[in-house]
Image: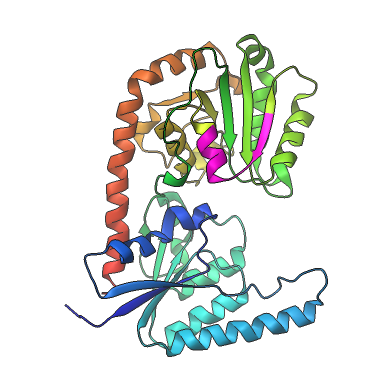
Amino acid sequence: MNTQSKTICLINAREESAGCRLRWLTLEEICFYNKYENLSSKRLELPTILRRTKEESKTSRVLSNILQAFQIGAQLLLNRRVKSIATGKPSSRAILLLLLACKTFRKTVIVDICDLDWSKKYTLAAIRIADIVTTPTEYLADEIKHIRKKPLFVIPDKLDYACLPSHKNVAANDPIDLLWFGNLEKEGAIRRESFAIFCKIIKNSKAFLIKNNISITIISPRAQDSLEMLFRAIGNTSLHCESLKWSPLAMQSALAKKGFALLPYKEPIKSCKKSPNRIELALYSGRTVLSNGFLPSLDAELQKHITICSNNQIDNSALKALKKSKNTLGQARALIENKQIKISEKWQAIADTII
């Protein structure tokens, strides 16, 4: 075994990004807890070339960021201990240039592609450059495998431990809560069709939800926007609805309550390439998951724990599933926990290529 000290450099690694936190940031954990004492990690923040404040001119910010990126890149390339770099979907040309330079200096380039929703041009270029490409689902891998000769590594998303409640906060007389959580772009439902479907299901189910005293909670980075979109879709209602800005604490508080998680996906759902990470988080926390179909990337054993909203409507079958889920929670958690072991082994195998 090569005992030379080696470093994995993580470019623009951010805990607030699920695509990073649940995926390639695992390499940092491996370096910390690894059986190999000669493998370490470090983070580098590379500026996005066009990011600027309102007070600055575009030209001055671009020039400043280019200079900063050049300095950071030079330090990285000349550091002999850095044998590999890892990053997620690149958001700028600066990152692509750094990836190309690292290839020239014979450093292993690892790129994780969690989806192709944005920065697709840069992402596809990074896939061609990278030595190792990881994706969360077979379906996404099939979409991009034609543009590279080397194999892709499919590694599912981890369970989002940062959002798990430490205990259930349930009182016997508490109302049932129905939760949606996820990202929402500035364009709202136009870009995030799954949220439009969520709003449609709520609209179709208003009478049922009011009759059974079920409240609505939305957790999103765009909390106020998402609530306004919901009200525009469902009109005037006596339903209790609230929206909270996403944070690990907000998620922990929400998931500690009893009730449902309504997590629909873009139609046709059988063609949806999304990761099941939100479903797994909701199931593991004890929520009864409702959806508009079975997400293809969700393990078959876990699909048995999903209740389908027929005709985009919630009915008594959801209440039956809620009662039943108390008895099946242990089984769902065991399946998800076993999956975490396999995920860790796959990221370990990626790290082993650098040793």
Residue 164 pos. (x, y %): 44, 39
> Which part of the image, by quadrant, shows the N terminus?
bottom left
The residue that appears at 77% across and 82% down in the rendered structure is 60
Span of residues in magenta: 242-253
Q: In this orientation, which residue lies closer to the viewer: 309 or 353?
A: 353
Residue 264 pos. (x, y %): 56, 33
Residue 42 pos. (x, y %): 42, 73
The residue that appears at 74% across and 48% down in the rendered structure is 187
Q: Is residue 149 above or below residue 83?
A: above
> Which part of the image, by quadrant, shows the C terminus?
bottom left
Any magenta on residue 246?
yes
Q: Residue furthest left?
A: 1
The residue that appears at 57% across and 30% down in the rendered structure is 179
| Quarter of the rendering containing residue 177 | top right
Q: In this orientation, which residue lies closer to the viewer: 173 or 22?
A: 173
Any magenta on residue 313?
no
The residue that appears at 60% across and 11% down in the rendered structure is 212
Q: Is residue 210 above or below residue 276?
A: above
Residue 317 pos. (x, y %): 49, 14
| Quarter of the rendering containing residue 4 | bottom left
User: In this orientation, does residue 114 appear?
Assistant: no
User: In this orientation, does residue 175 appear?
Assistant: yes
